[in-house]
Amino acid sequence: MSEKRSFGRRKKRLKVRFGIEYPRRVAFTCDASDRGMHILTSHPERPGTKLLIEIELPTGGSSVAYGYVRWAKKVPANLMRVADKAGMGVLLTSFISGEQAYYDYLKSLHH
């Protein structure tokens, strides 16, 4: 299958807050691309759920986006480090703020 992302998936640990109505849970990404991310959490939402996600960028800024949960794998918190693909995959659908900062950060990882 060919790569569809403009910026390929990169293993990167970014702090995120996510939630359905407001971003109340804290988690970290395992990887990220311009179209989505794998969020490592012991409390994933169900596939199809619309999320509001705040992404803290290492550059000091943040991005806020909406996304849909594409897949989820619930794992007990004590097994998070050893489980394969724990958490959820999120497809980013639109940005409220910081879209260019997020893309610029991803682009900087490719140099």
Image (tube, rainbow, N blue to C red):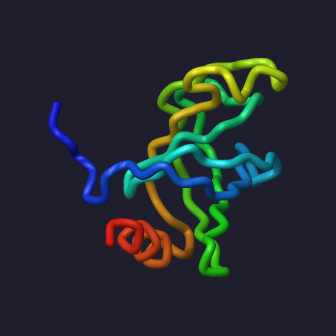
Residue positioned 72% across, 19% down in the render: 75
Residue 86 in the image: above or below residue 51: above
User: Residue 94: x percent and y percent?
Assistant: 46, 59
Residue positioned 46% across, 72% down in the render: 105
Whether residue 92 appears in this view of the structure is no
Residue positioned 68% across, 48% down in the render: 28
Between 105 and 93, the one lying in front of the other is: 105
Question: Which image quadrant is residue 59 in?
Answer: bottom right
Horizontal side of residue 33 vs 37, given as left or right: left
Question: Which image quadrant is residue 58 in?
Answer: bottom right
Horizontal side of residue 85 vs 79, given as left or right: left
- Quarter of the picture containing the C terminus is bottom left
Residue positioned 25% across, 58% down in the render: 6
Question: Which image quadrant is residue 86 in?
Answer: top right
Whether residue 74 appears in this view of the structure is yes
Residue 32 in the image: above or below residue 44: below
The outermost residue toward the left is: 2
Horizontal side of residue 74 vs 34, given as left or right: right
- Quarter of the picture containing the N terminus is top left
User: Residue 109: x percent and y percent?
Assistant: 41, 67
Between 20 and 107, the one lying in front of the other is: 107
User: Residue 99: x percent and y percent?
Assistant: 47, 72
